[in-house]
Amino acid sequence: MLYWLMKSEPDAFSIDDLRDRPKQTEPWDGIRNYQARNFMRDRMQPGDRAFFYHSNCDEPGIVGLMEIASTAYPDPTQFDPDSKYFDPKSTPEQPRWQLVDVTYERHTRRNISLKELKTYAEGELAGMKLLAKGNRLSIMPVAEEHWQFILSLE
């Protein structure tokens, strides 16, 4: 099992939105970064766990846990000319973009803020990709020791 951190802006799609979906499951669509796509396509597996991270908001941070519920498959929004994620260079025969389904597990007991996480950047969370300068990836792996430490902060 691998661990992940997946970011979403709460105004676009929040942890509450995931909890309220039928079967508490949703496709994680709209990813248009090749490295993030490759993580989903090449490494994510059903049963992996992920932190749900609210980004671009007053207090960015980890707000919940979810499970990867599917292997990667083509993101249908890339083929929809009415979607903001439409990619005219993608075809059903050669799709560029992938997604995975995620399932709500639970809210964290509290928001574990980016500010708080940064206080451990030289210690328990040294090397965590989220805390690397200039890292803006929306999906990133989390080392098991970082996963366990963050859970202990709840």
Image: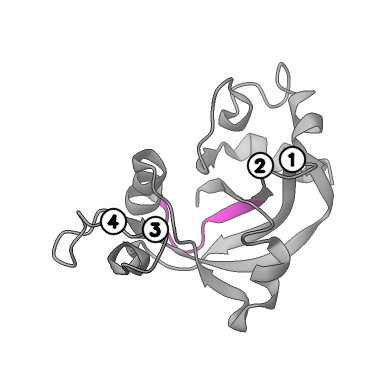
Residue lying at 34% horizontally and 58% vertically, measured from the top left:
98
User: In the structure shown, which secondary structural element does the residue marked by tag 3 occupy?
Assistant: loop
Report if the CB atoms under discs 2 and 1 are less than 8 Å apart. Answer: yes
Q: Which residue is mark 3?
A: 85
Mark 3 or mark 2, which is nearer the start of the sequence? 3
Q: Residue sitting at 33 percent across and 53 percent down?
A: 41
Q: Is residue 31 magenta?
A: no
Please name the amino acid that badge 3 sits on.
Tyr
Give me the C-alpha separation between circle 4 and circle 1: 36 Å
Q: Position of residue 110 (x, y in %)?
A: 86, 51
Labelled disc at residue 91: none
**Contact, mark 3 vs mark 4 (Cβ under 8 Å):** yes
Q: What residue type is disc 1 on?
A: Ile
The correct choice, above or below, for 42 with respect to 93 in the image is above
Q: Report the amino acid beneath label 4.
A: Asp
The answer to whether 80 appears left or right of 46 in the picture is left
Residue that carries the numbered disc 2 in the rendered image: 147
Label 3: few (<14), some or many (≥20) within 10 Å?
some
Pair 2/3: label in front: 3
Q: Which residue range is magenta in the image?
A: 44-52
Relative depth, front residue between 77 and 69: 77
In the rendered structure, the answer to whether residue 22 lies left or right of residue 1 reads: right
Q: Nearer the viewer, mark 2 or mark 4?
A: 4
Query: x, y (%) of residue 24?
Result: 62, 76
Image position of 23 with respect to 104: above or below? below
Name the spot of residue 96 as percent of width and height, x first.
25, 53
**Labels 4 and 1 touching (C-beta < 8 A):** no
Is label 4 or label 1 in front? 4
- Label drawn at residue 150: 1
Q: Residue furthest top?
A: 122
**Which residue is label 4 attached to?**
87
Contact, mark 2 vs mark 4 (Cβ under 8 Å) = no
